Image (cartoon, rainbow, N blue to C red):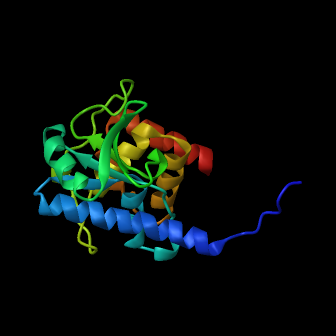
Amino acid sequence: MVARLVPDFERAFMAINKVEALLKKVTRALDRAGVEYAVVGGNAVAAWVATVDEAAIRSTKDVDILVKRSSLGRIQEALRKLGFDFVEVLGVSMFVDRKDPSPKRGVHLIFANERIRPEYAHPAPDPKSAVRARRGFMVIDLPNLVKMKLQSYRLADRVHLIDLRSLDLLSASLIRRLPADLRKRLRQLETETN
């Protein structure tokens, strides 16, 4: 017999709160350790979307952090104290909670000035381009976030780009500064979604 599923808002809200708590805990530890970093991925998109319309924010299940590879030792030391272990899963460097070591809920590292995937035309940006968010942590600047989303271009990335565009966060000057291949990809996305 199949159990009947019942929607569970409490668990949904708890999951969102866990990601926020993880983000705060990790970024505070990196700040204390003097590590240069930038929040990227879904949390960065949420931070930029919130500047225009907090009702348009989408939740995310993990934390993505842009760092310099040369800082890895200090990052490991800072996060080990918080109960996180460094692991590599399918070529992705991440930290997982010792008590709940799920890669889905880990802290994923993106290494600055390196290609995230071999087929990518452009390297990840440098965390120097980050700006301090109102919540205190460093977030990648909007032009570099858009570049990263256009380069990755998974379904989630395309949805994030559509959200940014719908809130007029993709200004003409930002688009003009994109590399030609990424401008072409953005035009393709606009064609597909109009």
Q: Kindly indicate the quadrant of the structure image that contains residue 100.
A: bottom left
**Along the viewing direction, whichever of 28 and 157 lies nearer the viewer:** 28
Q: Is residue 168 visible?
A: no
Observer-nearest residue: 164 or 136? Answer: 136
Q: Residue at x 53, y 49 (%)?
A: 156
Residue name at image x 51 percent, y 41 percent: 154
* Residue 29 in the figure: left or right of residue 14: left
Q: Give above or below for 112 relative to 165.
A: above
Q: Is residue 67 above or below residue 165?
A: above
Q: Against 95, is 9 above or below?
A: below
Q: Quadrant of residue 132?
A: bottom left
Q: Position of residue 191 (x, y in %)?
A: 58, 44
User: Considering the image in quadrants, where does the N terminus appear?
Assistant: bottom right
Q: Position of residue 79 (x, y in %)?
A: 24, 54
Relative side of 111 to 1, left or right:
left
Q: Answer yes or no: is residue 69 visible.
A: yes
Q: How many marks?
A: 0
Q: Which residue extends farthest top?
A: 118
Residue 160 percent across, percent down from the top left: 48, 54
Which residue is outermost to the left? 34
Q: Residue at x 64, y 73 (%)?
A: 9
Please identify the residue farthest to the right as the structure is shown.
1
Q: Nearer the viewer, residue 49 or 168?
A: 49
Q: Tell me which residue sits at (51%, 64%) in the image.
A: 58
